[in-house]
Image: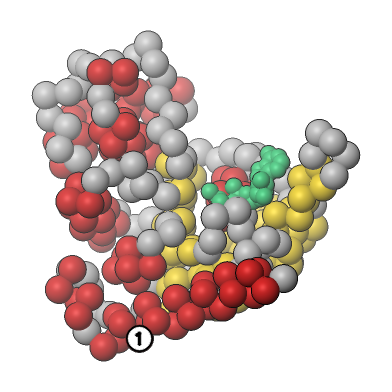
């Protein structure tokens, strides 16, 4: 469904210098698959998501969805950014329904569906609040509801739980898995938490430090539904160790350079 073929991304800096953020990245994601991406800060994870979302164009290679090259934002793709990006003047409910209204997909059931998602995210009673009246973690949960309401075929999530406390993070992880089971969407989930990646994903893509390349593609053979109890299983620990080894090898190589 998503096909990334030999993709490179180079940014030119203001001082004339250039940053090679990604180099020769190839990756495919099947319909309904849950893929996590892990790697050190600055290795190009956010850039990779922006390329899939059509928000930036590759400098080399090709990004395609269903065989068609991605040339801009698509209505079947939703993204949750690393920092919550809510409309400051609109209340929580209006923020969640905004893309649906923008795409003229809002119908009689849209508001009820939005309220139901907000309730599942622990935000019942906050529908009429403004973003500035919420904590960062609550704002991020609103942004997640906004993406899910669109019932996207492709959900791109950039460290979506980074601003949440540990308990809320666990709750939201399991809720995300429940929602994913209920509606068939491909998920590309960026995180710097190895255990979160293993808990959630069918496959974990490990990226090298800059320039980001794919150094491993680890299948997670754990049964679903997933639960935190599985963290004790040998298969969980073996996958986590394999990923951690790559990341520490990358860090050691950088320290030596
Ligand atoms: N718009 C941009 N202009 C210039 N450099 C950028 C831009 N976006 C990202 N970069 C650079 O590309 C590299 C990868 O960034 P990013 O994709 O945000 O990494 P990550 O999400 O893994 O932390 C970094 O060195 C970053 O500074
Ligand atoms: Mg990032």
User: Residue placed farthest to the left in the image?
Assistant: 125
Report x, y in % for residue 105: 39, 29
Q: Is residue 198 visible?
A: yes
User: Residue placed farthest to the top in the image?
Assistant: 89
Report x, y in % for residue 13: 79, 39
Foreground pick, 187 / 248: 248
Is 3 placed left or right of 136 in the picture? Answer: right
Q: Which quadrant would residue 20 be assigned to in this image? A: bottom right
Which residue is drawn at the image coordinates 60% and 53% (left, top)? 42
Circle 1 sits in a helix, a strand or a loop, which is it?
A: helix
Q: How crowded is mark 1: few (under 14 residues within 10 Å), some or many (20 or more)?
A: few
Residue on which disc 1 sits: 238
Is 150 placed left or right of 74 in the picture? Answer: left
Is 141 placed left or right of 246 in the picture? Answer: left
Is 250 placed left or right of 220 in the picture? Answer: right
Q: Is residue 67 above or below residue 228?
A: above
User: Residue placed farthest to the front in the image?
Assistant: 256
Report x, y in % for residue 64: 65, 57
Q: Is residue 15 above or below residue 151?
A: above
Q: Is residue 173 above or below residue 215?
A: above
State the scheme by which the image is colored: secondary structure
Q: Which quadrant would residue 93 be assigned to in this image? A: top left
Q: Can residue 108 be seen in this view?
A: no
User: Residue placed farthest to the right in the image?
Assistant: 16
Q: Quadrant of the C terminus?
A: bottom right
Which residue is drawn at the image coordinates 26% and 88% (left, top)? 234
Which residue is drawn at the image coordinates 20% and 16% (left, top)? 128
Report x, y in % for residue 235: 30, 86
Q: Quadrant of the N terminus?
A: bottom right
């Amino acid at each position: 469904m998503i096909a990334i073929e030999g993709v490179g991304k180079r940014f030119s800096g203001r001082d004339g210098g250039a940053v090679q953020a990604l180099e020769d990245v190839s990756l495919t994601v099947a319909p309904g698959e849950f893929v996590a991406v892990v790697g050190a800060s600055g290795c190009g994870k956010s850039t990779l998501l922006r390329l899939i979302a059509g928000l930036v164009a590759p400098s080399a290679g090709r990004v395609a969805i269903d065989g068609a090259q991605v040339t801009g934002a698509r209505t079947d793709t939703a993204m949750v950014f690393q920092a919550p990006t809510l409309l400051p003047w609109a209340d929580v409910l209006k923020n969640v329904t905004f893309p649906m209204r923008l795409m003229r997909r809002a119908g009689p059931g849209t508001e009820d569906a939005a309220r139901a998602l907000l309730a599942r995210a622990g935000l019942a009673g906050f529908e009429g609040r403004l973003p500035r009246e919420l904590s960062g973690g609550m704002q991020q949960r609103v942004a997640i509801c906004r993406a899910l309401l669109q019932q996207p075929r492709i959900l791109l999530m950039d460290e979506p739980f980074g601003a949440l406390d540990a308990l809320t993070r666990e709750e939201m992880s399991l809720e995300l898995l429940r929602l994913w089971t209920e509606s068939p969407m491909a998920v590309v989930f960026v995180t710097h938490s190895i255990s979160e990646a293993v808990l959630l994903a069918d496959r974990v893509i490990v990226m090298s430090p800059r320039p980001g390349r794919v150094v491993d593609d680890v299948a997670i053979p754990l049964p679903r539904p997933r639960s935190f109890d599985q963290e004790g299983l040998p298969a969980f620990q073996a996958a986590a160790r394999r990923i951690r080894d790559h990341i520490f090898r990358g860090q050691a190589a950088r320290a030596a350079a």
